């Protein structure tokens, strides 16, 4: 199972493996203070896409389409997350204030679809 969580929420043992999926380090958190298993900058949207989106909910549908297109091109970046998710729970950490319109939501859904397809294969 792949879930998402804001970096500002407390760490829980139920989080499993925790990956930060932001290109920029979250504001107000010391690097030593964030409990995580890896910082996957390459999983975040490109700088150009991140700047274009600018957390504008009106651009959400197009942002999702563009971000998924970027993810499709960079399978080497997300395959390790899938491998980890096959062995247990994975939590994708993000810093955005908007819990519904952020890259971790898109990434979680993208990866869960990939896992679902794998399970259907004979």
Image (tube, rainbow, N blue to C red):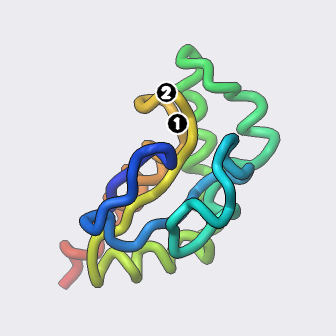
Q: Position of residue 68 (x, y in %)?
A: 55, 49
Q: Is residue 73 visible?
A: no
Using residue 62 as the reference point, say whether residue 4 is left or right of it.
left
For label 1, the residue is 102
- The answer to whether 95 appears left or right of 117 in the picture is right
Task: Using the image, determine if residue 26 lies above or below residue 115.
Answer: above
Q: Quadrant of the C terminus?
A: bottom left
Tag 1 secondary structure: loop
**Residue 122 in sight from this viewpoint:** yes
How many numbered badges does the structure rendering display? 2
**What residue is shown with label 2?**
98
Alpha carbons under labels 2 and 1: distance apart = 7 Å
Outermost residue to the right: 48
Q: For the residues labelled 2 and 1, say whether their Cβ atoms are less than 8 Å apart.
A: yes
Residue beneath the point at 45% across and 67% down: 18
Task: Judge whether 21 appears above or below 103 on screen.
Answer: below
Place of residue 30 in the rendered image (x, y in percent of width and height, measured from the top left): 68, 55
Asked whether 110 or 1 is in front, the reply is 1
Mark 1: few, some, or many residues within 10 Å (few <14, many ≥20)? many
Taking 51 as reference, is 105 above or below it?
below
């Amino acid at each position: 199972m792949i879930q998402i969580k804001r970096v500002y929420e407390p760490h829980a043992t139920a989080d499993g493996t925790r990956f930060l999926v932001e290109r920029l380090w979250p504001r107000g958190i010391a690097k030593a203070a964030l409990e995580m298993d890896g910082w996957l900058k390459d999983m975040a949207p490109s700088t150009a896409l991140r700047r274009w989106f600018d957390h504008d909910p009106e651009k959400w549908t197009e942002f999702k389409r563009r971000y998924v297109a970027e993810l499709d091109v960079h399978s080497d970046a997300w395959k390790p997350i899938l491998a980890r998710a096959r062995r247990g729970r994975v939590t994708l950490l993000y810093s955005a204030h908007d819990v519904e319109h952020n890259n971790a939501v898109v990434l979680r859904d993208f990866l869960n679809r990939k896992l679902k397809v794998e399970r259907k294969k004979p």
